[in-house]
Amino acid sequence: MVISKAASESDLSVHSTFASRYVRVSLPRFKMPENSIPKDAAYQIINDELMLDGNPRLNLASFVTTWMEPECDKLIMDSINKNYVDMDEYPVTTELQNRCVNMIAHLFNAPLGEGEAAIGVGTVGSSEAIMLAGLAFKRKWQNKMKAQGKPHDKPNIVTGANVQVCWEKFARYFEVELKEVKLEDGYYVMDPEKAVEMVDENTICVAAILGSTLNGEFEDVKRLNDLLVEKNKETGWDTPIHVDAASGGFIAPFIYPEIEWDFRLPLVKSINVSGHKYGLVYAGIGWVIWRNKEDLPEELIFHINYLGADQPTFTLNFSKGSSQVIAQYYQLIRLGYEGYKNIMENCQENTMVLREGLEKTERFNIVSKEIGVPLVAFSLKDSSRHNEFEISEHLRRFGWIVPAYTMPANAEHVTVLRVVIREDFSRTLAERLVADIEKVLHELDTLPAKVTAKLAATAEGEGSSGHKKSPMEVQLEITNVWKKFVAERKKTKNVIC
């Protein structure tokens, strides 16, 4: 006799997730729910909602790595439960970080003796790395000014207006005046001559960018170093240089070895680089390297022993995962110099394919340079009817995420689109993107101009002051309207940037 029983309402093992009550109610958004739900239902519901995210591989706005080999993925998952800060419990992980620091320091031509350990640390990203480097410069400057009996309460730092926002955060959080060299139309990086002119006795360092976020261009660190050497001789100061190589640090050594930007220059005292960009590791790893031990004040290093042994630490956070450190070491030994060089050359070649494809349309001005980070920044030659923000919006229908943005102060009237070429962006994808951009241009050409035309007609007319606006003023006003339009759309979609 076969004994059977009907499934009770509480026997969930026989139910499909989509046949259960859990898909009939809204997910909690503000308060933790009172009751538990089955693990498969929680997974399915969250996974379904995440499908609405963009495809990371098609996110051409980001410099951050979106693909790694399956073997490295496995290493990451195997070590995801290791807290990096537990150095005594995980000594091998600590050793791998030290090996990464040494390899990167040698890549940047640090003046190290045979068998000498480099001075550096792994960070959550370049933002933390920049904070640490900035703190080291500030403390060294303060110590020097105190020893000379001079005021030490008004430090400043000189950068270009094209710096990433983390520099503004450093200045605001740690009370350092940020002196920005304004950009010029057609010249979107820091001018070394103007930067050195802004240096004074209270300047803790000049920050140069190896790979501008705006157009990928390398700033002329060699020229900056030479000018600063002369100024230091004239004034008796010893103003140093920090190189923000977040994007370009893993590019220049492999395809532009002749460019002098690193520790070969005597005033370069520290360099940061993002392992999660062209270091080819998933998001969450950066590095900061100092020229020598004297450039990192000892009083900034903490020593703890409550995890089992004396451990030096110089970070802004404490606990963090070990996975990204291990992944960085994997990439360094897996690829070696040869592998990184091949990948960067591929990125460079695919950049040229995209650049040439856009030039053939005869609709765009290319703003980016051929030497620099592999990206293409471009703007419309004629934006009187439709602009870059509309192109960006229409490309999303094809799955592409291509940002449109305006340049900083003194060049706000210039709007550009930017495509970052990463390791996993093939020639086929480059050609497909050009084809899709041509489709978007054709579609826009067949549509009547909307906000742009109306605004242009108003802006070109007589204003309340009775003068006709210049083409630059018209374009700036059009750009501002589109920025507000895009921002409002993001708000209505609950998108947080």
Image (tube, rainbow, N blue to C red):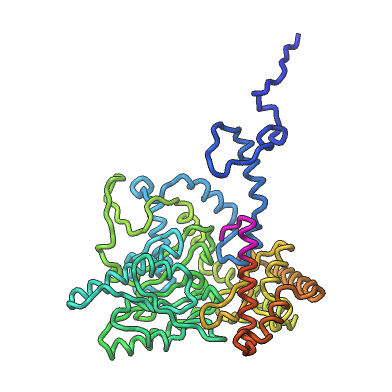
Q: Is 249 rendered above or below residue 359?
A: above
Residue 113 or residue 70, whichever sits in front: 70
Query: Is 442 left, or right, of 51 in this rendering?
Result: right
Say which quarter of the image contains residue 231: bottom left
In the image, residue 488 lies in the stretch drawn in magenta: yes
Give the quadrant of the N terminus: top right
Q: Position of residue 145 (x, y in %)?
A: 22, 76
Q: Quadrant of the C terminus?
A: bottom right
Where is residue 29 shown, x and y percent of the image? Answer: 57, 44
Q: Is residue 259 above or below residue 119?
A: below
Residue 4 appears left or right of 96: right
Count of picture labels = 0
Report the span colored magenta. Answer: 487-497
The residue positioned 28% from the left and 82% from the top of the image is: 201
Residue 115 point in image, percent of width and height: 33, 66
Residue 157 sits inside the magenta stretch: no
